[in-house]
Image: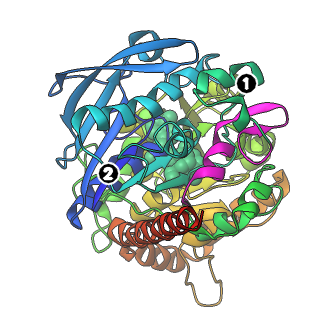
């Protein structure tokens, strides 16, 4: 089966969040299961082009009245998956992927229309026609509509599309005047397709046209089919009259494993935990926290965004730090939050610390050094942070929502079983109670903490399981497309 993935970020080339973790590994796992997979990404300035070669192809992509020209670079991911980067300096030669912190570039519609349509043109240029086209989030959500319109009679038009929604909150909504830049006629600006509250919504268009829709956990699949987490698009999902498939993400154990993680000065596993103590001391030193092995250390690695409940965390912080704990956070994002967390070490010297920015190395050190990992998410489609934390023996303290609900087993005081601590409501009080429960278990039931760590570290969230579920969805999509084609042929025959 030939599968084309189009995404806006993928590890190890470029990453702002979990989408990159998924787009960077799933194609390779599918290849391991026998698919012929290619991945298309924009060639951002942040991508280092060593190992990439410019192809003798230029793409002329119509964007409204203009045609934009781009070049193509070919390389591969570390697992060998072929990657094609679409080059367009004015669109992608910028410091950020989507916009400055907390903002969006004004021309994001043409930037990602270029990616979406350019990727299809690339297939024509290579005469490589996929059986399945797999899209990720609003950035590539125009593709299903292109397949039904501009590509309808081309060899690409027979390919069904699978759209994975990693986050229903990011919809790619733009002023109506930008509709012509999509390359689709105004007849598609209606409430069944791309029109959403008088704006153009790329994600809504994707939902209307995709053959199959998936999202990244079973609970989030249910949540987005209702309010409020459907964010107004629950009706568009309902109109499809077909299921939204919830496929839990896996994690990459070649990168995320404390027994051979190259960012750590000491290695450990669930049977030999001594190294974790050293990692905790390292982290305390690097972050300027007091080097105390007896205090429970709470860590966070996150985009500083509303989704992550960091406003509630900020409100609760003084109270939380009355507990006998330490706290450290690595994050970047909303400017107010960057300012708030920036100088917590001045307010609570030795007890709280932050690093504002993006650091792969520090992220690994926090998962390894922390005793607990906080995720007070307002909503969480899947969440990878808690999976990494579980693997590194940092017990997650999470809000019971989306993928957090599906992957963390709440602590049972009577048996000592569980892999973390869950709380239901999102308010400072509930967060304080959950941290309080974790802290008191740490001090009074150390055997339970050890047991939970061992249970969590033994779990496997395998990508192969997820990839097999995607294969089932691909087969469903192929079948659906085939029946639609036969219906069309029948109608034509009867005319
Ligand atoms: P989301 O995709 O919504 O941001 P996930 O939990 O799925 O949430 O994935 C977040 C990923 O991004 C994790 O791999 C996490 O370690 C990483 N990450 C987030 N913020 C940072 C940061 N400031 N520095 C390094 N890694 C980060
Ligand atoms: C999104 C979600 C996150 C999920 C990630 C990968 O960024 O916010 O919960 O883990 O995509 O699917």
Residue 139 spot, x, y in % from top left? 54, 36
Residue 263 spot, x, y in % from top left? 28, 42
The outermost residue toward the front is 495
301 left or right, relative to 359: right
Q: Identify the image quadrant of the C terminus.
A: bottom right
Residue corresponding to mark 2: 130
Q: Nearer the viewer, residue 161 or 22?
A: 161
As drawn, 343 above or below 171: above
Q: Mark 2, mark 1: which one is toward the viewer?
A: 2
The reply to whether the magenta stretch includes residue 196 is yes
Q: Nearer the viewer, residue 218 or 128?
A: 128
**Mark before the other along the chain sequence, 2 or 1:** 2
Residue corresponding to mark 1: 336
448 left or right, relative to 241: left
What is the span of residues highlighted in magenta in the rendered image?
Answer: 191-214
Q: Residues within 10 Å of mark 1 (few under 14, many from 20)?
A: few
């Amino acid at each position: 089966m030939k599968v084309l993935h189009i995404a806006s970020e993928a590890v190890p080339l470029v990453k702002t969040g979990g989408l990159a973790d998924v787009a960077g590994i799933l194609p390779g796992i599918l290849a391991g299961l026998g698919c012929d997979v290619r991945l298309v990404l924009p060639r951002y300035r942040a991508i280092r082009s060593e190992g990439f070669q410019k192809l003798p192809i230029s793409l002329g992509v119509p964007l409204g009245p203009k045609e934009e020209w781009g070049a193509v670079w070919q390389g591969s991911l570390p697992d060998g998956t072929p990657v094609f980067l679409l080059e367009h300096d004015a669109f992608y030669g910028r410091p950020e992927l989507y916009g400055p912190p907390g903002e969006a570039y004004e021309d994001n519609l043409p930037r990602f229309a270029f990616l979406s349509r350019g990727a299809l043109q690339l297939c024509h240029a290579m005469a490589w026609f996929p059986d399945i086209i797999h899209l990720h989030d609003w950035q590539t959500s125009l593709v299903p509509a292109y397949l039904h319109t501009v590509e309808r009679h081309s060899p690409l038009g027979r390919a069904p599309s699978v759209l994975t929604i990693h986050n229903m909150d990011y919809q790619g909504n733009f002023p109506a005047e930008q509709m012509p830049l999509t390359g689709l006629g105004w007849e598609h600006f209606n409430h069944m397709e791309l029109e959403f509250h008088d704006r153009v919504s790329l994600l809504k268009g994707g939902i209307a046209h995709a053959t199959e829709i998936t999202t990244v956990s079973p609970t989030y699949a249910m949540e987005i089919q209702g309010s409020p987490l459907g964010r107004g698009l629950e009706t568009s999902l309902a109109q499809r009259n077909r299921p939204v498939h919830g496929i839990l993400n896996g994690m990459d154990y070649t990168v995320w494993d404390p027994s051979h993680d190259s960012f750590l000065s000491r290695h450990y596993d669930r049977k030999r935990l001594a190294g974790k103590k050293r990692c905790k001391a390292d982290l305390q030193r690097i972050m300027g926290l007091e080097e105390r092995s007896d205090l429970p250390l709470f860590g966070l690695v996150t985009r500083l965004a509303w989704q992550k409940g960091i406003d509630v965390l900020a409100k609760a912080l003084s109270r939380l730090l009355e507990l006998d704990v330490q706290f450290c956070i690595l994050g970047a994002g909303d400017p107010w939050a960057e300012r708030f967390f920036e100088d917590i070490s001045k307010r609570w010297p030795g007890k709280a610390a932050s690093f504002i920015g993006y650091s792969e190395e520090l992220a690994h050190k926090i998962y390894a050094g922390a005793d607990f990992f906080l995720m007070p998410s307002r909503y969480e489609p899947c969440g990878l942070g808690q999976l990494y934390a579980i693997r590194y023996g940092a017990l997650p303290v999470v809000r019971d929502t989306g993928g957090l609900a599906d992957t963390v087993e709440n602590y049972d005081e009577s048996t000592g079983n569980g892999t973390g601590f869950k709380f239901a409501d999102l308010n400072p009080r509930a967060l304080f109670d959950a941290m309080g429960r974790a802290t008191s278990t740490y001090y009074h039931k150390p055997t339970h903490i050890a047991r939970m760590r061992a249970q969590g570290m033994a779990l496997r969230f395998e990508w192969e399981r997820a990839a097999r579920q995607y294969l089932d969805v691909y087969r469903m999509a192929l079948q659906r497309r085939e029946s639609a084609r036969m219906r069309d042929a029948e109608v034509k025959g009867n005319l």
